[in-house]
Amino acid sequence: MNSSDLASLCLRSSLPPVRCQNSCRLSDLGLLSSALVLFRLLYLLMARLFGWLALLARDDTLKDVEILVVRHEALLSRTEVEDLCLLAVAAVG
């Protein structure tokens, strides 16, 4: 049996489409997807807005402390990366 025989066999034996009983219509899924995206967008916007409001209510000293903590975390992660690079170079050489 060659490829043309297989193609003609496939075209002749066309079965009716099978539909699952629990499947939703595409239009329902699109509406649900749009609603979920809208809800997520509103949630993210509100979370960002409340974060900004909380930042405005903070004292300047608390803001300075937070900046120092973030700088310290960045310094620690930078030294960890440098240590890993030195270990990798030592392992290769």
Image (cartoon, rainbow, N blue to C red):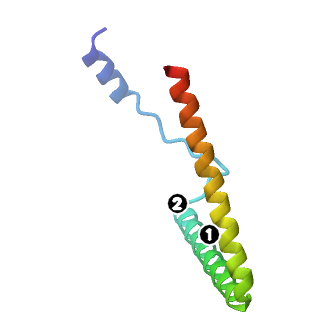
Front in this rendered view, residue 37 or 55: 55
Residue at the spot x=58%, y=50% of the render? 78
Residue type at the position of mark 1: Leu
Residue at the spot x=68%, y=89% of the render? 53
| Whether residue 80 is situated above or below residue 5 in the rendered picture | below
Q: Residue furthest top?
A: 1
Residue type at the position of mark 2: Leu
Of marks 2 and 1, the one in the foreground: 1
Q: Which mark is residue 26?
A: 2
Residue at the spot x=49%, y=20% of the render? 93
| Whether residue 3 is situated above or below residue 88 in the rendered picture | above
Q: Mark 1 = which residue?
A: 36
Cβ atoms under marks 2 and 1 closer than 8 Å: no
Front in this rendered view, residue 19 or 29: 29
Res 88 quadrant in image: top right
The local crowd at label 1, few if under 14, some if 14 to 19, many if 20 or more residues have their Cα within 10 Å, is few
Q: Which mark is residue 50?
A: none
User: So how many labels did they put on this image?
Assistant: 2
Rendered location of residue 83, percent (x, y): 60, 38
Q: Residue furthest left?
A: 4
Rendered location of residue 9, percent (x, y): 35, 21
Rendered location of residue 41, percent (x, y): 58, 75
Rendered location of residue 73, percent (x, y): 67, 59
Front in this rendered view, residue 48 or 71: 71
Front in this rendered view, residue 79 or 26: 79
Res 59 quadrant in image: bottom right
Residue at the spot x=65%, y=52% of the render? 76
